[in-house]
Image: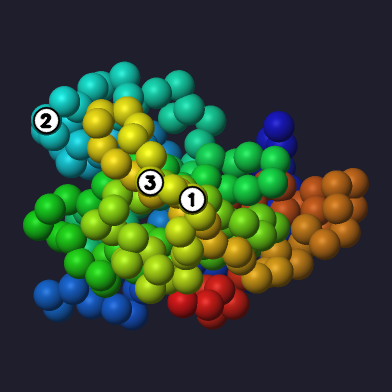
Amino acid sequence: MPDGSYSADYPQSTMDVGVTQRWRGKPVRATVAENFDDLVRARVIRGAVWLCQEGARYDVQFDRNDTCSTHLLAWVGDEPVGTMRIRWLPDQARFERLAVRPEFRSMTVFRALAKFAFALCAAKGYRTVTSVALEDTIRLWERLGAKVNGEALLLQVDKCVVPMKRDLPAAAHPALAGGAGTLDFELAMVMAEADLMRSSSEVSA
């Protein structure tokens, strides 16, 4: 692993997708969970949203994939209100464990979190994102360009979900173009993941 002794001169972008949007007068943004406190915030939100559901199981909501995934946070002002994790598979990124606190659920918050996630995946060079969605959220995902990708399935806590897929534009961070071993690529490897991406404008809504 890089020891952080190098720095890169690439433009730093916090990728606060949706930061210009507002919810009840407060700015909405999304970020990568970058430290222990952020990871705690993500787990608390997910637990508060899902573990209160009938039939919920802790070992389903919090599994061994948590330690090998990237976790995102949605914010309203300075308050963490939503979370999602991304698993990095060989040919696709996988969205999982989306949770938004009930009092903050809105298209504004959902859009900020989802667009940030799409932008991060595109910046890392991924061209496909998959997930499963509860049936009553399909239209929300479709508004952001995702499409139904299979028949409804009955998974885990007796909830019916539908496979979803979205193709992404070629929008990898320019530092990755030369591939492993090049100076740009190796310098990019010590950048914070939140900064390893292009402008959100390159990912269509």
Nearest the viewer among 127 and 139 is 139
Instruction: Assess disc 3: are there few (<14), some (14-19) or many (≥20) residues with their C-alpha within 10 Å of its C-alpha.
Output: some
Nearest the viewer among 89 and 157 is 157
Whether residues under marks 3 and 1 lie with C-beta atoms below 8 angstroms apart, the answer is: no
Whether residues under marks 2 and 3 lie with C-beta atoms below 8 angstroms apart, the answer is: no
> How is this picture coloured?
rainbow
Say whether disc 2 or disc 3 marks the residue closer to the N-terminus. 2
Instruction: Assess disc 2: are there few (<14), some (14-19) or many (≥20) residues with their C-alpha within 10 Å of its C-alpha.
Output: few
Gap between marks 3 and 1, in whole Å?
7 Å
Q: Is residue 119 left or right of residue 62?
A: right
Can the viewer see residue 20 in this picture? yes
Q: Amino acid at mark 2?
A: Glu
Circle 3: element type: loop
Q: Quadrant of the N terminus?
A: top right
Residue denoted by label 3: 152
Location of residue 178 (image quadrant):
bottom right
Instruction: Assess disc 1: are there few (<14), some (14-19) or many (≥20) residues with their C-alpha within 10 Å of its C-alpha.
Output: few
Residue denoted by label 1: 150
Q: Amino acid at mark 1?
A: Gly
Q: Position of residue 69 (x, y in %)?
A: 51, 36
Q: Position of residue 116 (x, y in %)?
A: 45, 63
Say whether disc 1 or disc 2 marks the residue closer to the N-terminus. 2
